[in-house]
Amino acid sequence: MRKLIFGMNVTLDGYIAAPGGDIAWGGPPSEELFQWWLDGERANGLSLYGRKLWETMSSYWPTGDQRPDATRAEVEFARNWRDTPKVVFSTTVGEVDWNTRLVTGDAVAEITRLKAEDGAPMSIGGARLAGAAMRAGLIDEYALATYPVLVGGGTPFFTALDSWVNLTLVETRTFPGGVVLTRYETRR
């Protein structure tokens, strides 16, 4: 059975985007934090995206390694992003590219099916998609890179749940700029 990981940059008050979808509060990540995210992405066998995150990622990373100011880690991230199989869950996206498959049906049923397969871990991104997986009890690990900023509202990292989810802390690490990474595994 595959592991499903939900990880994002998040504000101290729990948002992945401020009102209006603004993510400028994070600024560019430190080289160390970017490398940590890259290492995690390399370990994934499949990336699952909701529409908004897909549009953000696919507008930059297909050619991110061709930018003259790209760092070594950004070049590696772009190449890994293109090579990693991806699934986009959307009823409005017309077509996808870069080693990607589009799913327009029941996201929870498809994620459940994918989790039952053998293989490397999967990452999930996009607030609504991750929220559906969270409510269905499908997420095995949460990774939060918490930035020392309060935005007061926006898109929350966590969704409303029907019952508690007990977690076990597996990693805490501090990065430049006061960003604190915490990883938790779901206790089953």
Image (cartoon, rainbow, N blue to C red):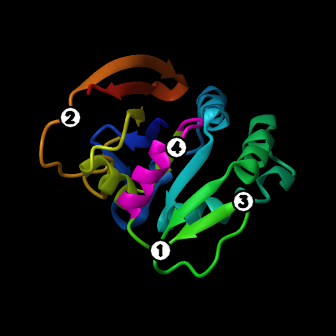
Distance from disc 4 to disc 2, alpha carbons, whole Å, reads: 24 Å
Give the number of the disc on residue 165: 2
* Element type where label 1 sits in the image: loop
Whether label 1 touches label 3, CB < 8 Å = no
Name the spot of residue 163 as percent of width and height, x first: 12, 42
* Distance from the alpha carbon under mark 1 to that under mark 3: 17 Å
Note whether 13 is above or below 68 in the view shown. Answer: above
CA neighbours of label 2 inside 10 A, class few (<14), some (14 to 19), many (20+): few
Determine which residue is flagged by label 3: 99
Q: Marks 3 and 2, how far apart in space?
A: 33 Å
Q: Which residue is mark 4?
A: 117
Q: Earlier in the sequence, mark 4 or mark 1?
A: 1
Calculate the distance from the C-alpha at mark 2 to the C-alpha at mark 1: 28 Å
Q: Is residue 117 magenta?
A: yes
Which of the two labelled residues, at mark 3 and mark 2, occupies the earlier sequence position? 3
Q: Main secondary structure of the magenta part?
A: helix
Q: Which mark is residue 147?
A: none
Badge nearest the viewer, 4 or 1: 4
Residue 18 visible somewhere in the drawing: no
Secondary structure beneath label 4: loop
Q: Secondary structure at mark 2?
A: loop
Any part of residue 24 in sight: yes
Mark nearest the camera among 2 and 1 is 1
